Amino acid sequence: MTSIALRVLLTNYCPESCRHCSFSRVHSDNSEELDPLLLAKCVELISNDHANKITVVLTGGEPTAAKNFIPVMNQLNDSRISKLMLATNGIALYRQKDLFKSVKKFCPDTISLSMETTKEDHDLLRGGAGASGNHQLVSELLKKVKDEMAETETSINSVVFAENLQKVTGFLHGFRQNRLLWKHLDFVRLMRFRRETPSINAAGISEITDDQWTEFQQLIKNDESLKDFNGRYKVYFLDKSHEKRLAIAISPPNKLTISNSNLDQQFVDQFIEVARDCFDVIVEND
Ligand code: SF4
C-alpha cells in the first residue's frame, strides 16, 4: 500500500515580507488558521486506509507563528502518521528559546529552512535590507538542530531566479567546502521562481526559461561533488509536479485539495465522500 503525503497549511499568516510569496504581508488581523479538529479528522480519514503511512508536511504562511502550532505538533505526535516535516523560515525557531525547546521535544523527522544563494539575494527576495541577517541565522540554526536533534534531517529550500542562476552552483559548493555545514545539512531543495505566484512586489526578480531550468538541473545532477557520503545527491528540484505528488493538502478555513496523480482511485472516491462533510473539496486532475 502506498504512502500518502499530506500538506498542512496551518496558517496563512507570516510576519515576513518575501516578494515572491502570496502570504507575504498577511498580518495577524486578517489571517486565517486551520482548525486542529479538521486536521485530526483528515488524518483519521486517511488512516483508515493508510495508517502509519502518512507523511505530514507542516507549512504556512509561517507555521511556527500559528496560535495552534504547539497543540498541532502535540496532536501529530500522538497520531498515526509516519513522518513529520516542518517547513519554516527558521526565524522564530532561532530567536525563541522556548519554541526551539518545544520543537525539540517533538523531534520532527525533517526541518526545512528557507535560505537564498547569497545575503544580497536573501535581501532581494525576502524583504529588503535587514533580511540578510536571517541568511546567517539559518546557517547557525542548521548546526543547532543537528547538535540538539541528532535524529532530525535538515533541509534548505532555496529559490532559483534569473538574477541568481549563476550563483547557485557556488552556493552549493560553499556548503560543500564548509565541512561542518555540509555535515549539518541533509539535503537542499531548489525551487524555480514563478511570476504567476500572486506576488506583492517581485521587482528585480525574473523567471528562468524552461531550457535554462533543464540545463541547470543537468549541470547539478552531473556534479559528483554534490553527493553525500553514500553517493546520493543532496540536491533536489521542486516544481509543479512535486506539488502534485503531495497528493492531499488542507488549508484554512476548511479547504481540502486532492491531486489524483499517485492515489488509488477507490481510496480517493471513498475519501471524498466522507471528507465532504467537513471540507470544501477540490479535486485537481493531472
Ligand atoms: S516565503 Fe515563507 S517566510 Fe517569506 S513571506 Fe512567505 S511564508 Fe513568510
Image (tube, grey):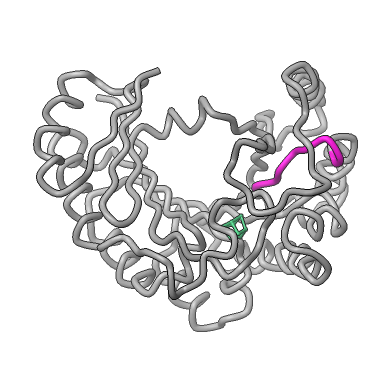
User: Looking at the image, can residue 184 be seen?
Assistant: no
> What residue is rendered at 14% in x and 49% in y?
278
Magenta run includes residue 160: yes
Task: Say which quarter of the image contains residue 168.
Answer: top right
Q: Quadrant of ligand 1?
A: bottom right
Magenta run includes residue 178: no
Using residue 45 as the reference point, say whether residue 215 is left or right of it.
Answer: right
Residue 7, percent from left and from top: 39, 45
Using residue 45 as the reference point, say whether residue 103 is left or right of it.
Answer: right
> What residue is rendered at 64% in x and 42% in y?
187
The span shown in magenta is: 157-164
Task: Say which quarter of the image contains residue 206.
Answer: top right
Front-most of 72 and 121? Answer: 121
**Up/down of 189 relative to 203, above or below:** above
> What residue is rendered at 54% in x and 57% in y?
23
Residue 53, percent from left and from top: 28, 38
Quadrant holding the N terminus? top left
Task: Say which quarter of the image contains residue 37.
Answer: bottom left
Residue 2, percent from left and from top: 30, 26
**Up/down of 269 relative to 172, above or below:** above
> What residue is rendered at 51% in x and 63% in y?
62
Quadrant holding the C terminus? top left
Using residue 239 as the reference point, say whether residue 54 is left or right of it.
Answer: left
Residue 104, percent from left and from top: 47, 70
User: Looking at the image, can residue 203 be seen?
Assistant: yes
